[in-house]
């Protein structure tokens, strides 16, 4: 499927006198594709595909209800998978995981509370390894 810009680009380059082979090479498409689009005077319209019905579709309301009931806790996908299998689900767990992951809340890390102390009130040190191997060198910084 070519974009509208590519379709127009093919026609403009051909009108400027470029060969079909040169157009195909520059745009990275086959010569047959260039020929086909030069024969058409309008941009081809593509129908949008309907989403296929999955095996999980009848169980989605149940899964959404279970996830909402458990908030703020989280139910693992394996537990939900066992539940829907008992209800008659015959699909795989990967499809269920893809559906369930959209409901997982992203955890934002707690902000770090910084505090300052006066000189001499608190000591801060760090421990580091400078050299590894047979004779490691470690230091307090």
Image (cartoon, rainbow, N blue to C red):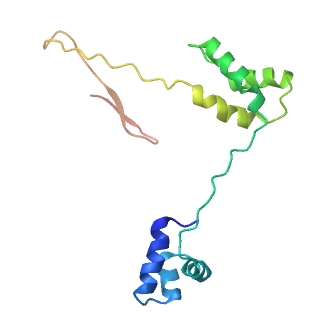
Marks counted in the figure total: 0
The x and y percentages for residue 85 are: 83, 25
Residue that appears at 86% across and 26% down:
88
Asked which quadrant contains residue 81, the reply is: top right
Residue at figure coordinates x 73%, y 44% from the top left: 52
Above or below 31: residue 60: above
Tell me the residue at 34%/20% (across/down).
111
Q: On the rendered image, what quadrant is the C terminus found in?
A: top left
Left or right, 58 with reference to 98: right
Q: Indicate whether 8 appears above or below 62.
A: below
Left or right, 87 with reference to 69: right
Taking the image as shown, residue 129 lies to the left or right of residue 67, namely: left
Place of residue 2 in the rendered image (x, y in percent of width and height, measured from the top left): 54, 67
Q: Nearer the viewer, residue 97 or 59?
A: 59
Using the image, determine if residue 4 lies above or below residue 54: below
Q: Quadrant of residue 94?
A: top right
* Residue 75, visible in the rendered structure: no
- Whether residue 90 is visible to the viewer of this picture, yes or no, is yes
* Left or right position of 106 against 101: left
Quadrant of the rendering where the N terminus is positioned: bottom right
Residue ranking furthest to the top: 121
Viewer-closest of 45 and 135: 45
Residue 97, percent across and down? 68, 32
């Amino acid at each position: 499927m070519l974009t509208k810009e590519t379709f127009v680009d093919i026609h403009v380059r051909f009108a400027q006198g470029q060969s079909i082979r040169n157009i195909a090479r520059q745009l990275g498409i086959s010569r047959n594709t260039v020929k086909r689009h030069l024969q058409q005077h309008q941009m081809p319209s593509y129908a949008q595909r309907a989403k296929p019905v999955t095996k999980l579709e009848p169980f989605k309301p149940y899964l959404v209800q279970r996830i909402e009931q458990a908030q703020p806790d989280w139910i693992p996908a394996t537990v939900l998978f066992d539940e829907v299998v008992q209800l008659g689900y015959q699909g795989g767990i990967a499809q269920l995981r893809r559906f369930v992951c959209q409901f997982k809340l992203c955890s934002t890390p707690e902000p770090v509370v910084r505090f300052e102390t006066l000189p001499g009130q608190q000591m801060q040190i760090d421990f580091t390894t400078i050299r590894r191997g047979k004779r490691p060198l470690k230091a307090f910084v």
